[in-house]
């Protein structure tokens, strides 16, 4: 996988985790650990979601990781059932 594709995937994961932190999907007790994990993941792959230029270049919006995953599951069900 190319570096840009990897960074797009990583940004999508970070976006998903940040939404989970903000919308209450993650328990209050787990938020801090998840925030640290998000920072570590970003650093490991050279992705900084606060860098607007990088985020704009790598973003998959208006899609999101959950919508892409949902589409995959529906497609798999249709073709491999």
Image (cartoon, rainbow, N blue to C red):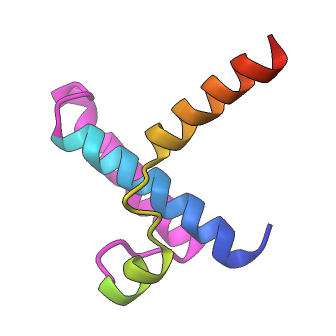
Let me know if residue 28 is in the magenta part: yes
Q: Give the residue at the far top of this rendering.
A: 81
Residue extending furthest toward the bottom: 53
Q: Going by the image, does 55 lie left or right of 6?
A: left
Quarter occupied by residue 72: top right
Is 49 one of the magenta-colored residues?
Answer: yes
Q: Position of residue 7 (x, y in %)?
A: 59, 70
- Residue toward you, 13 or 74: 74
Q: How many marks?
A: 0
Q: Is residue 13 above or below residue 71?
A: below
Q: Nearer the viewer, residue 51 or 35?
A: 51
Name the residue furthest front: 78
What stretch of residues is rendered in magenta?
A: 23-51
What residue sits 22% from the left and 25% below the top? 27
Which quadrant is home to the N terminus? bottom right
Identify which residue, 4 or 79, lies in the foreground.
79
Measured as percent of width and height from the top left, residue 47 is found at 48, 74
In this view, 70 is above or below 8:
above
Residue at the image position 17 percent from the left and 43 percent from the top: 22
Residue 74, position in %: x, y?
A: 61, 24
Chief secondary structure of the magenta portion: helix
User: What residue appears at the point 70 percent right and 17 percent down from the top-left corner?
Assistant: 77
Q: Is residue 67 above or below residue 74?
A: below
> As displayed, is residue 46 above or below residue 79?
below
Quadrant in the picture for the C terminus: top right
Left or right: residue 6 versus residue 46 is right
Horizontal and vertical percent position of residue 13:
48, 51
Left or right position of 42 against 44: left
Q: Is residue 6 left or right of residue 16?
A: right
């Amino acid at each position: 996988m190319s570096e840009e594709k990897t960074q797009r995937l990583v940004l999508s994961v970070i976006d998903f985790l940040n939404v989970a932190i903000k919308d209450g999907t993650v328990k209050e007790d787990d938020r801090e650990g998840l925030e640290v994990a998000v920072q570590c993941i970003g650093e490991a792959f050279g992705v900084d979601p606060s860098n607007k230029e990088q985020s704009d270049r790598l973003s998959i919006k208006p899609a999101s990781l959950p919508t892409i995953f949902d589409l995959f599951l529906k497609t798999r069900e249709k073709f491999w059932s």
